[in-house]
Image (spheres, rainbow, N blue to C red):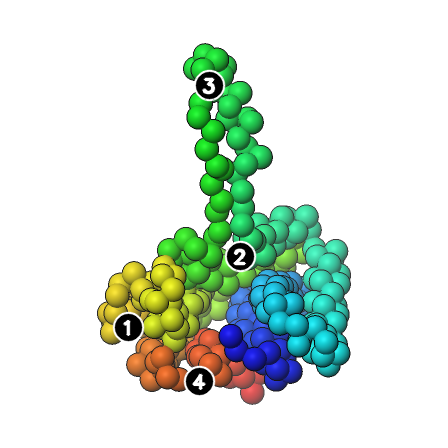
Amino acid sequence: MSILTIPKLVDELFLRPIVISMNSLALSALMSYVMSANGSIDWRPITICVTSDILAMGADHLKDKEEEFSSDRDNVNDPRLAAWFIYARTFLTASAILLALALSQCPISTLLTTAAFVAPALLWTTPISFKKFAPILRRLLGRFGGDKRQPSTSAPVLVIKRIPGMKAIFNGIIRGCGIYTVVLSVLSGSGNLTNTLPSPWSVVQLIVWSTVNRSCHAIMTDVRDFEDDMKAGVPTIPVLLGSVLKTKAILTACHMLVMLAFIENPYIMGSCLFAAALVWMLGKDSPKKAFLFSSHSQSLFIIWYLLTRHL
């Protein structure tokens, strides 16, 4: 078991959620800018996307670290470590307050949209038992199939994280489609939604590029843990394919297909080339901070676009 230290807690509970959420900040800022009728950047969808990211990832990491903290008697007696958990809860509480503030300034459709995309992320590692549905099923079976007794079986338990490929799917849908839908609901609710996006952007480009990029990055983080996941039997995409090389070839093909589909957009083209290069530059021996940097293969080109519009 790895030793729990303050730098490790800071990294897991603060640095990672903040760095990853900066991609959502860049992407929501881009969508808000190009989708608004007056060419302005709305603070509400940006705040919603950033704080939702922090809450989903921060809560997941906090749960893991609290279990690790309580499993070691020496940790419990260390007040310095315990203090950082208080800081983390304060950080998450502040994020939740900001999220609530932003949602209070939005139409009800934004609240429903945010809940639809954030709820699965918050339930990522939560065991979902179907035991509560068993009495209903038994009544239905008794009503339509007579009064025959069925042998009692334990109710199945579902953990979303354990479903093969779900990590990549969730990351892509939540950070691609989810961000677009939040921005759309906010701008349409305020009457500031444009009918035509400025060149070279389109709605299809924004959704496909974001979804594929986020899904591919999620799979790349599994490449880093390939050997450990293989031994533990964790059904990640690289483990299911049985090869890091095959995984990298497929990821490269995905980035190249997006680039070719939207080759008229130099920002998407540059982002896809950069992301494809990172696929081959990073591996199981690369430091975790390098993978954090790779999450911003979109952000750099979004910043480039926004700077060219204002300089």
Q: Residue at x 52, y 38 (%)?
A: 130
Instruction: Report crowding for label 1: few under 14, some 14 to 19, many 20 or more residues within 10 A (C-alpha).
Output: many
Q: CA distance from mark 1 to mark 2?
A: 25 Å
- The kind of residue on which mark 4 rests is Pro
Secondary structure under tag 3 reads loop
Q: Disc 4, disc 1: CB below 8 Å? A: no
Secondary structure under tag 4 reads loop
Residue 188 visible in image: no
- The kind of residue on which mark 2 rests is Thr
Q: CA distance from mark 4 to mark 2?
A: 25 Å
Residue 153: x %, y % from top left: 46, 33
Q: Residue at x 73, y 59 (%)?
A: 100
Instruction: Report crowding for label 3: few under 14, some 14 to 19, many 20 or more residues within 10 A (C-alpha).
Output: few
Name the N-terminal-most of marks 3 and 2.
2
Q: CA distance from mark 3 to mark 4?
A: 57 Å
Q: Does 76 appear above or below 236?
A: below
Residue, far bottom: 311
Residue 125, disc: 2
Instruction: Report crowding for label 4: few under 14, some 14 to 19, many 20 or more residues within 10 A (C-alpha).
Output: few
Name the N-terminal-most of marks 3 and 4.
3
Q: CA distance from mark 4 to mark 1?
A: 17 Å
Name which quarter of the figure residue 191 lies in: bottom right
Name the N-terminal-most of marks 4 and 2.
2
Name the N-terminal-most of marks 3 and 1.
3
Give the residue pinned by disc 3.
Answer: 149
Secondary structure under tag 1 reads helix
Residue 287, disc: 4
Instruction: Report crowding for label 2: few under 14, some 14 to 19, many 20 or more residues within 10 A (C-alpha).
Output: some
Q: CA distance from mark 3 to mark 2?
A: 34 Å
Q: CA distance from mark 3 to mark 1?
A: 50 Å
Q: Nearer the viewer, residue 278 or 240?
A: 240
